[in-house]
């Protein structure tokens, strides 16, 4: 047990966050990657990059490890077993918890080339094809949707093993995945202008990346504004327009979501989680957690354990 919760604030680092655009030219014979081999990766514990691409990415986390998944402006706590679905154009990256590192299996796949016998107009009618008009979960636990978990798991296994009739199996299962995931999507406000939203995100992305990489530090709003070449008032206005939160509010959101990911690991004391997430006292952490979720960290952890 620590004698004191007081701590000297961490120095805010201006990280070199790599922003990448990954484009692959798949073919009808090679419509996915990996194809015929197994790819297992353990994400870093640090927020180091965000990237997007021109294909669908499926992810499989079979072990009960935990971490976070960053998708655009959202930081999602993850505990396996779980799956992920990322569509072309979504900026994303994954991180592991320090004490329970994740081992993800990812699959990059061109859905059109993987499903040559499926009518393209039918695919366009599914909500995923215009995902930016909808709210949906990019990371889904096995307990939330066991069918979706099983389908994604088998598609990844089929692409790895290339067994008998694997192309036909992949075609059917991938269509089921996209149909099932589309059925969970709910339309967002018709008033949202997606072009303006993308432009807003581009303006504040340096601040979002800074917060995601330094959530445990004493981040100052003037520093974020300077990073984005904006006034403090403009930064606040753009943050609220994009995600409905002020920069401070977004910082607390990231801290709380990371705290949830750490609580899911089950191996870290709440005091240590509070310090890691930037709260100098246990009382300030508990207060913010209850404000966000309506219950204490201890109660939240107990309720999640009962759900599993």
Image (cartoon, rainbow, N blue to C red):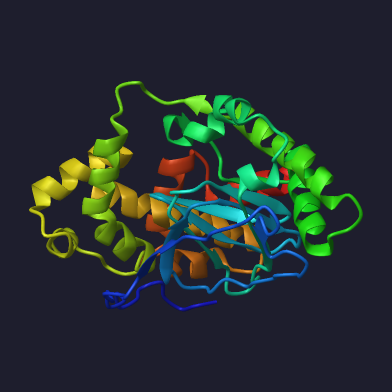
Left or right of 264: which side holds 249?
left
Out of 29 and 259, give the one closest to the viewer. Answer: 29
Out of 255 and 15, give the one closest to the viewer. Answer: 15
Quadrant location of the N terminus? bottom right
Classify residue 274 by image quadrant.
bottom left
The residue at the point 43 percent across, 69 percent down is 47
Q: Is residue 216 visible?
A: no
Classify residue 230 by image quadrant.
bottom left
Q: Which residue appears farthest toward the front when viewing the image?
A: 28
The residue at the point 57 percent across, 68 percent down is 96
Left or right of 85: which side holds 191?
left
Return the x and y of residue 304 as percentages of the image width and height. Answer: 67, 46
Compared with 171, 6 (above or below) is below
Out of 226 and 197, give the one closest to the viewer. Answer: 197
Q: Which residue appears farthest toward the top when viewing the image?
A: 190
The residue at the point 73 percent across, 48 percent down is 152
Classify residue 238 by image quadrant.
top left
Return the x and y of residue 220 as percentages of the image width and height. Answer: 19, 63
Label tally: 0
Q: Is residue 182 visible?
A: yes
Return the x and y of residue 296 as percentages of the image width and height. Answer: 52, 47
Out of 12 and 259, give the one closest to the viewer. Answer: 12
The residue at the point 67 percent across, 64 percent down is 104
Return the x and y of residue 7 as percentages of the image width and height. Answer: 34, 76
């Amino acid at each position: 047990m620590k004698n004191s919760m007081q701590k000297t604030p961490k120095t805010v680092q201006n990280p070199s966050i790599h922003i990448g655009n990954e484009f692959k030219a798949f073919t009808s014979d090679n419509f996915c990657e990996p194809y015929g081999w197994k790819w297992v990766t353990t994400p870093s514990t640090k927020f180091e990059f965000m990237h997007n691409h021109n294909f669908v990415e499926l992810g499989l986390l079979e072990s009960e490890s935990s971490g976070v998944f960053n998708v655009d402006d959202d930081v999602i706590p993850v505990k396996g077993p779980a799956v992920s679905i990322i569509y072309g154009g979504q900026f994303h990256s994954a991180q592991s918890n320090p004490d329970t590192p994740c081992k993800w299996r990812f699959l990059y796949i061109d859905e059109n080339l993987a499903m040559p016998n499926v009518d393209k107009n039918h695919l366009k009618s599914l909500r995923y094809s215009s995902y930016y008009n909808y709210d949906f979960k990019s990371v889904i636990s096995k307990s939330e949707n066991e069918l979706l978990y099983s389908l994604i798991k088998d598609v990844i296994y089929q692409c790895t093993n290339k067994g008998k009739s694997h192309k036909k199996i992949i075609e059917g299962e991938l269509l089921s995945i996209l149909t099932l995931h589309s059925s969970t999507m709910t339309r967002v406000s018709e008033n949202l202008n997606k072009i303006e939203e993308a432009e807003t995100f581009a303006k504040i992305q340096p601040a979002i990346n800074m917060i995601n990489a330094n959530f445990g530090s004493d981040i100052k709003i003037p520093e974020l504004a300077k990073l984005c070449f904006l006034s403090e008032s403009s930064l606040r206005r753009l943050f609220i327009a994009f995600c409905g939160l002020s920069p401070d509010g977004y910082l607390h959101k990231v801290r709380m979501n990371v705290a949830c990911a750490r609580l899911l690991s089950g191996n870290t004391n709440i005091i240590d989680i509070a310090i890691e997430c930037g709260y100098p006292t246990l009382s300030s952490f508990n207060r913010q957690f209850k404000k966000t979720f309506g219950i204490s960290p201890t109660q939240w952890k107990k309720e999640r354990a009962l759900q599993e």
